[in-house]
Image: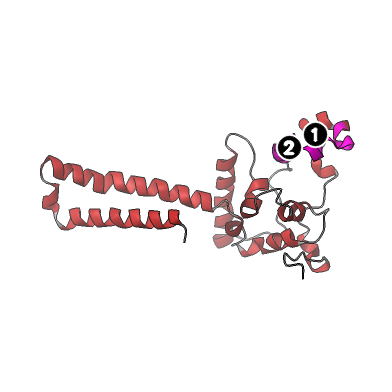
Amino acid sequence: MTLTTMALIAFALVTVLVISMVMVRPSLAGGTAGKTLALVALAVLPAVATTFGTNAHLEASKTTDFCLSCHAMKPYGESLELDDSAHLPAAHFQNSRVPRDHACFSCHTTYTMYGDLDAKMKGLKHLWVNYFGTIPEKIELYEPFHNRECLHCHDGARTFEENEFHADFRQELATNETSCLECHDVAHEVEKLHELERWSRDGE
């Protein structure tokens, strides 16, 4: 349990305690000081607890562990461990090109003003489908992958800038006229997991 989680639990307990005091002993709410206490107990503390709790859960929902906690995502998590340098997710994950604890979110959010919010709204839809809908046999992106999400990290990187092939298509890549995935086209390949070798962190 993280320090942040412990602090949130402690704050929630204090909130419940103060609310309980006001409800059990309404006389505490008498006078100016009492009304202030009642306002704090019934409005301010719950609002603050809700705000911090919501923020903590939103941050937790960006983690790789959270994404892979859904059984439908398990094969996608396994694909991060494939021993294949041409395999985009595995190469990014294993070489720390994205933070391992935020690997899914790093590539599957859109780097726009409301990208995080849009990702969360889609996540709520996924949650609904997971519990109340029908998970499709083949999971696909809502829309084609935009080069913006690749260039957010790779633009300016030496390995990208000094690659002569990239230089030939620099403008087309920047405008999304030519997709990065036209060349880097090996994604999760979950249908072939049983055929491919796995990378072991222990070298075994």
Residue most toward the top?
Answer: 171
* Residue 151 - label: 2
Residue 76 at least partly seen: yes
Task: Say which element carries label 1.
Answer: helix
Residue for point 80% across, 34% down:
173
Q: Compare marks 2 and 1 and give the one earlier in the sequence.
A: 2
Q: Is residue 112 above or below residue 201?
A: above
Q: Quadrant of residue 158?
A: top right
State the CA–CA distance, disc 2 to disc 1.
Answer: 9 Å
Estimate the x, y position of residue 36 in percent, counting from the top left: 19, 42
**Number of other residues with Cα within 10 Å of mark 2, as a class: few under 14, some 14 to 19, many 20 or more:** some
Left/right of residue 130 with respect to residue 49 in the rendered view: right
| Mark closer to the observer (2, 1) | 2
Foreground residue among 86 and 199:
199
Left/right of residue 204 with respect to residue 112 in the rendered view: right
Task: Say which element carries label 2.
Answer: helix
Residue most toward the bottom?
Answer: 204
Is label 2 in contact with label 1 (beta carbons under 8 Å)? yes
Does residue 162 show up magenta in the picture? yes
Estimate the x, y position of residue 19 in percent, counting from the top left: 24, 53
Residue type, numbered disc 2: Leu
Residue type, numbered disc 1: Leu
Residue for point 82% across, 49% down:
185
The C terminus, quarter of image: bottom right
* Residue 173 - label: 1
Residue for point 29% across, 44% down:
44
Q: What span is colored magenta in the figure?
A: 146-167
Estimate the x, y position of residue 163 in percent, counting from the top left: 86, 37
